[in-house]
């Protein structure tokens, strides 16, 4: 499989994600992360059917978020819908990462969501870390922002590719990349108001073109 994108458009937690937003991402190296907290992989794919169709037509890679307990269903959905891989949520352990690789095969992308510095980076393609800042999209249970220092600590672990999430937009992305983030993910920056999405995606893409993987200072 080709190199994974460093920008990830995360679907909003409720409602049908706007498939038309895909046209605003053209020219940027964007992947789509299908995510609905508490929903099964099959329900997520059904909710995002229009987005999956539009993104696939544009050649955008798509991954799906799931709990470790839903891996079997996620693997089946990935095969059926032509998805590129999964993002395991809930700070998955080594066993879950190995199980994901077994079920999806060597060509799939395996990522995981973490809320603290983790290891076992050899078992996943990237680690989503956050919330770095206060999220723009409210969550049922609020999370304390981690700040950019945790990115620097996480990125220092051998082989780590850290994707920053939580309040990441054109105003905050540079700080994440300077701290050592390899990639960026967000909801509103990709599925918000049309003018804001156009600005955010253009700026995020430009920042990644010049960013180095690793902090600019110690």
Image (cartoon, rainbow, N blue to C red):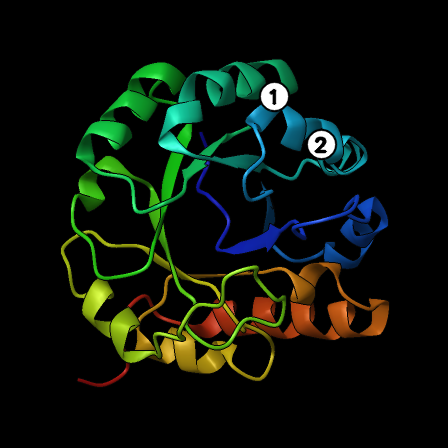
Q: Residue at x 29, y 16 (%)?
A: 102
Pointers 2 and 1 in contact (C-beta within 8 Å): yes
Q: Indicate the position of residue 120 as horizontal and vertical percent values.
A: 17, 43
Q: Secondary structure at mark 1?
A: loop
In the rendered view, would you say 59 is above or below 103? Answer: below
Mark 2 or mark 1: whose residue is earlier in sequence: 2
Determine the residue positioned at 34% across, 78% down.
Answer: 148
Q: Can you tell which mark lies on residue 205?
A: none
Q: Which mark is residue 56?
A: 2
Q: Give the distance between the C-alpha atoms of the residues marked 2 and 1, in whole angstroms.
A: 8 Å
Q: Which residue is mark 1?
A: 82
Farthest-out residue, front: 141
Q: Nearer the viewer, residue 123 or 48?
A: 48
| Residue 83 x, y percent position in the rendering | 57, 27
Image quadrant where one finds the N terminus: top left
Q: Is residue 217 left or right of residue 20?
A: left
Q: Is residue 71 above or below residue 5?
A: above
Horizontally, residue 96 falls left or right of residue 14, namely left
Q: Position of residue 178 (x, y in %)?
A: 36, 80
Q: Quadrant of residue 44?
A: top right
Residue 137 on image: x %, y %: 63, 66
Mark 2 neighbour density, 10 Å: few (under 14) some (14–19) many (20 or more): some
């Amino acid at each position: 499989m080709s190199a994974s994108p460093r920008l990830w458009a995360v679907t909003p937690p409720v409602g049908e994600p706007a498939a038309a937003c895909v046209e605003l991402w053209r020219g940027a190296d964007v992947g789509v992360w299908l995510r609905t907290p508490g929903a099964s992989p099959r329900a997520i794919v059904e909710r995002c059917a229009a987005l999956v169709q539009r993104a696939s037509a544009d050649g955008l890679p798509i991954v799906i978020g799931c709990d470790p307990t839903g891996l079997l269903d996620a693997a089946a959905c990935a095969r059926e819908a032509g998805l590129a891989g999964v993002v395991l949520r809930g700070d998955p352990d080594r066993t879950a990462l190995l199980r994901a690789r077994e079920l999806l095969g060597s060509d799939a992308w395996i990522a995981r969501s973490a809320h603290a510095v983790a290891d076992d980076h050899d078992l996943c393609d990237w680690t989503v870390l956050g919330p770095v800042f206060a999220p723009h999209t409210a969550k049922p249970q609020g999370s304390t922002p981690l700040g950019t220092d945790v990115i620097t600590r996480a990125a220092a672990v051998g082989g780590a590719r850290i994707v920053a999430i939580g309040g990441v937009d054109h105003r905050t992305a540079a700080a994440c990349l300077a701290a050592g983030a390899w990639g960026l993910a967000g909801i509103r920056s990709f599925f918000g108001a049309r003018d804001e999405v156009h600005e955010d995606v253009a700026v995020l893409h430009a920042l990644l073109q010049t960013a180095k993987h690793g902090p600019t200072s110690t």
